[in-house]
Image (spheres, grey):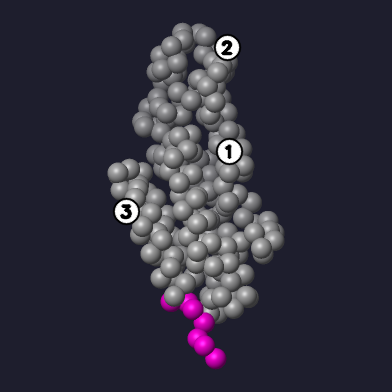
Amino acid sequence: MERGNTKQEILRAALELFSVQGFEATSVSQIADAVGIRKASLYSHFENKQAILDALVEEILARYAERSIFAGADREKTADSLPQTPDAAVQMIRGQLFYILRDPAISRARKMLVIEQFRNPELAKLQTRQNYTDVMQYFTRVIKNLIRKGVLAEDDPEIMAAQLCLPISVWLGLCDREPEREQEVMELAEKHIRQFFRRYQPEAK
């Protein structure tokens, strides 16, 4: 989120606090203090703490739709826009991991969703959508396309998609807890992707 005006500063500070201590444990006073304004001044921008959260979710969704390859995974995309080779899959997944881990707003938003998923039904749905449903839909489309092109052997595309993407999701969570392991995770992800393509390589006729 861009710095520059008080409203954006409030959202930035709130997201940082929510990602560390959660929505319920964060007070409006703490957000105001983090911005360096009075509580009354904060209320001139947002009616209450829920309004801040609502604005954050709206920004998160907009940022996700703009930058994530998984956004709109249920919509038809041209086959040529999907990775066609192990090298293309490695490049695509590494790029997405770098974005998810290194974009400060996306990184904090993901941590906030992890904290709030068992307390806030709306955020629980968003967590499931962004970190499971959209990801699985995208990779299932990738697998179906690669099977159709003869790059991968035919099998259950949804199970294959799960085998490919879910270990990477686990490693992503590891990076959230232990950021110093990012390089290790990147190397594991690449080895995993290449092994997946080898295991599902079609038998020569």
Question: Could you tell me which secondary element the residue under label 3 belongs to?
Answer: helix
Tags 2 and 1 touching, CB below 8 Å: no
| Residue drawn 36% across the image and 32% down it | 20
Q: Which of marks 3 and 1 is nearer the N terminus?
A: 1
Instruction: Point out residue 149 in the picture as x, y percentages from the top left corner.
Output: 62, 75
- Residue at mark 2 to residue at mark 1: CA–CA distance: 25 Å
| Residue drawn 52% across the image and 22% down it | 3
Give the vertical position of 145 relative to 135 (above or below): below
Q: Can residue 109 be seen in this view?
A: no
Question: Could you tell me which secondary element the residue under label 2 belongs to?
Answer: loop
| Residue drawn 45% across the image and 16% down it | 35
Which residues lie in the magenta part?
Answer: 199-205
| Residue drawn 52% across the image and 13% down it | 42
User: Is residue 95 a member of the stretch shown in magenta?
Assistant: no
Q: Which residue is the site of mark 2?
A: 44
Please name whichever residue, 125 or 161, is drawn nearer the observer in this view of the structure: 161
Residue 184, numbered label: 3
